[in-house]
Image: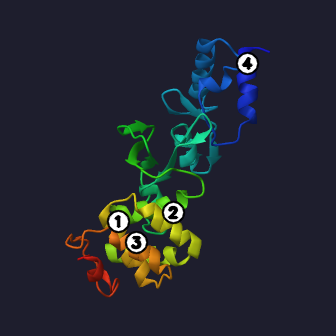
């Protein structure tokens, strides 16, 4: 089979929106230059789309034009290394999916232990935040909640009060074991994050009293956290030195 035929046959079998590079074809084809040349030719003819330098995707056409791949496809090479999970999508795109804002961002933020400078990939800017906890599939939803609490001042197109109200809804939905796990993960976050988490958990009547006390014991009793939250929303804010 010719190189061009092999590439086109494999692409035809890929799902729409799947992001790939020339490396995906190198197991069967040894000529790197030939693969890249044919992929660029296909992109030029509109049969595939180019996401960024060296990255392509199989487009899904609609009446409004080609859809971009979902965000996980766009950054999947940054989320895993040798089959091991090392990162997760968080930040601005997460705020929308959690119902914290209606704004859709062109920034994809990734939580990782080892971070790097931000860069552009197609129309998206990829940025990173340091995650000190071990990352696994089980704790990613909890890490995302903690990230939202940590960056509550940066959630766009909303207020801190509204964000707190929505976060309390999400915290109430967690089962007891997940609330405990959330508190444990919070120990590696900033003091302001720990204080706000404790206040939110108290506000919703969380039953994990011992864990919440342990959380408060990690805080400096004279440190004040300026978040400007209404007492109507967070009645115990002063107890946690939140103003």
Q: Position of residue 77 (x, y in %)?
A: 54, 37
Q: Which residue is tagged 1?
A: 193
Discs 4/1, front: 1
Q: Earlier in the sequence, mark 1 or mark 3?
A: 1
Image marks 1 and 3: residues in contact by CB distance under 8 Å: no
As drawn, 145 above or below 34 = below
**Residue 100 seen anywhere in this rendered image of the structure:** yes
Identify the residue shown where x is 64% and y is 44%. 60
218 and 97: which one is in front? 218
Alpha-carbon distance for marks 2 and 3?
A: 18 Å
Q: Secondary structure at mark 4?
A: loop
Q: Which residue is tagged 3?
A: 214
Residue 66, quarter of the rendered image: top right
Colour mode?
Answer: rainbow
Q: Earlier in the sequence, mark 2 or mark 1?
A: 2
Discs 3/4, front: 3
Alpha-carbon distance for marks 4 and 1?
A: 50 Å
Q: Secondary structure at mark 1?
A: helix
**Image quadrant containing the C terminus:** bottom left
23 and 135: which one is in front? 135
Q: Secondary structure at mark 2?
A: helix
């Amino acid at each position: 089979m010719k190189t061009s035929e092999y590439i086109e046959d494999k692409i035809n079998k890929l799902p729409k929106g799947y992001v790939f590079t020339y490396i995906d074809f190198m197991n069967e084809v040894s000529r790197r230059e030939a693969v890249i040349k044919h992929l660029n030719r296909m992109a030029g003819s509109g049969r595939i789309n180019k996401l960024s330098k060296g990255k392509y995707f199989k487009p899904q056409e609609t009446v409004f034009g080609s859809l971009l791949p979902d965000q996980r496809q766009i950054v999947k090479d940054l989320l895993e290394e040798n089959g091991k999970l090392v990162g997760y999508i968080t930040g601005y795109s997460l705020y929308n999916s959690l119902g914290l804002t209606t704004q859709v961002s062109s920034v994809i933020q990734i939580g990782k232990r080892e971070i790097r400078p931000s860069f552009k990939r197609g129309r998206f800017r990829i940025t990173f935040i340091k995650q000190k906890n071990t990352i696994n599939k089980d704790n990613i939803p909890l890490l995302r909640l903690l990230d939202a609490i940590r960056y509550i001042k940066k959630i766009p197109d909303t207020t801190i009060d509204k964000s707190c109200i929505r976060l309390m809804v999400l915290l109430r939905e967690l089962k007891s074991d997940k609330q405990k796990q959330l508190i444990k993960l919070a120990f590696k976050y900033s003091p302001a994050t720990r204080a706000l988490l404790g206040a939110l958990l108290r506000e919703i009547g969380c039953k994990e009293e011992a864990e919440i006390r342990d959380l408060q014991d990690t805080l400096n009793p004279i440190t004040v956290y300026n978040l400007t939250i209404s007492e109507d929303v967070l009645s115990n804010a002063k107890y946690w030195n939140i103003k």
